[in-house]
């Protein structure tokens, strides 16, 4: 998270999937930050609770009286499984809560959810503007995420060399 008051923060599960904790990432280098994350993220859940994570962000924004331009632009949710959920409905819940607090669409963070252990073929879905769901894991998907974290969608996935030999038959 790039701007104060949420700069260098991460949201993790507490003892249950409904208990979310906000942490300041500790460490001076990538290795120490990774170690902090591994230790901090020991509690996990198969349930993706991104609306509650966005509630935590909204709560901080309201307390700190953040303006739209100070709001987090993108939320990354890493989970075990991302398939089989009503993402569009959940994202609409988030939008409604932000709007109730006076934030318009430009202040609502884009959400990227990545189900790292989904057993399906790696895929990218965009069930709603502002929401991207990645399922599965592949070298290509990892590269796309690292290179294009801000702009990742089905078109970028299809640009990989493994898909270049495909032909569309009409």
Image: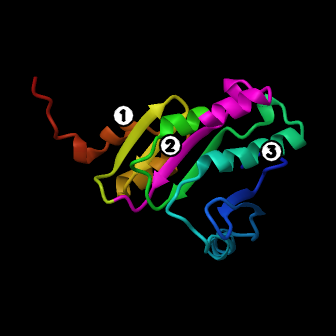
Q: Residues within 10 Å of mark 1 (few under 14, many from 20)?
A: few
**Residue 138: x percent and y percent?**
35, 57
Q: Nearer the viewer, residue 74 or 53?
A: 53
Q: How many marks?
A: 3
Tell me the element at label 3.
helix
Q: Nearer the viewer, mark 3 or mark 1?
A: 3
**Residue 47: x percent and y percent?**
52, 58
Residue 130 showing in the rendered view: yes
Q: Nearer the viewer, residue 62 or 123?
A: 62
In the shown orientation, is residue 11 left or right of residue 132? right
User: Which residue is the site of mark 1?
Assistant: 155
Residues drawn in magenta:
93-118
* Residue displayed at 57% across by 68% down: 44
* Residue displayed at 79% across by 50% down: 6
What distance separates the C-alpha of mark 1 from that of mark 2?
A: 12 Å
* Residue displayed at 51% across by 51% down: 146
Q: Of callouts 1 and 2, which one flags the residue occurring earlier in the amino acid sequence?
A: 2
In the shown orientation, is residue 115 left or right of residue 19? left
Question: Is residue 106 a member of the stretch shown in magenta?
Answer: yes
In the shown orientation, is residue 20 left or right of residue 139? right
**Residue 114: x percent and y percent?**
48, 52
User: Which residue is the site of mark 2?
Assistant: 148
Cβ–Cβ below 8 Å for labels 3 and 1? no
Looking at the image, residue 102 lies above or below residue 11 = above
Question: Is residue 109 a member of the stretch shown in magenta?
Answer: yes
Q: Of callouts 3 and 1, which one flags the residue occurring earlier in the amino acid sequence?
A: 3
Looking at the image, residue 19 lies above or below residue 140 = below
Q: Of callouts 2 and 3, which one flags the residue occurring earlier in the amino acid sequence?
A: 3
User: Which residue is the site of mark 3?
Assistant: 59
Work out which quarter of the rendered image holds the C terminus and state it.
top left
Q: Nearer the viewer, mark 2 or mark 3?
A: 3
* Residue displayed at 69% across by 74% down: 32
């Amino acid at each position: 998270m790039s701007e104060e008051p949420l700069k260098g923060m991460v949201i993790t599960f507490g003892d249950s999937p409904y208990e979310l904790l906000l942490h300041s990432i500790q460490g001076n280098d990538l290795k120490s930050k990774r170690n902090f994350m591994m230790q901090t993220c020991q509690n996990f859940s198969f349930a993706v609770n991104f609306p509650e994570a966005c509630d935590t962000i909204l709560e901080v924004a309201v307390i700190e009286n953040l303006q739209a331009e100070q709001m987090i632009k993108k939320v990354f949710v890493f989970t075990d499984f991302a398939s089989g959920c009503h993402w569009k409905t959940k994202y609409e819940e988030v939008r409604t809560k932000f709007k109730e607090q006076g934030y318009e669409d430009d202040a609502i963070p884009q959400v990227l959810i990545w189900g790292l252990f989904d057993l399906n073929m790696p895929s990218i879905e965009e069930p709603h503007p502002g929401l991207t769901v990645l399922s599965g894991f592949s070298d290509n998907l990892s590269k796309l995420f690292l290179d294009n974290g801000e702009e990742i969608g089905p078109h970028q996935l299809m640009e990989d060399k493994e898909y270049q030999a495909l032909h569309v038959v009409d």
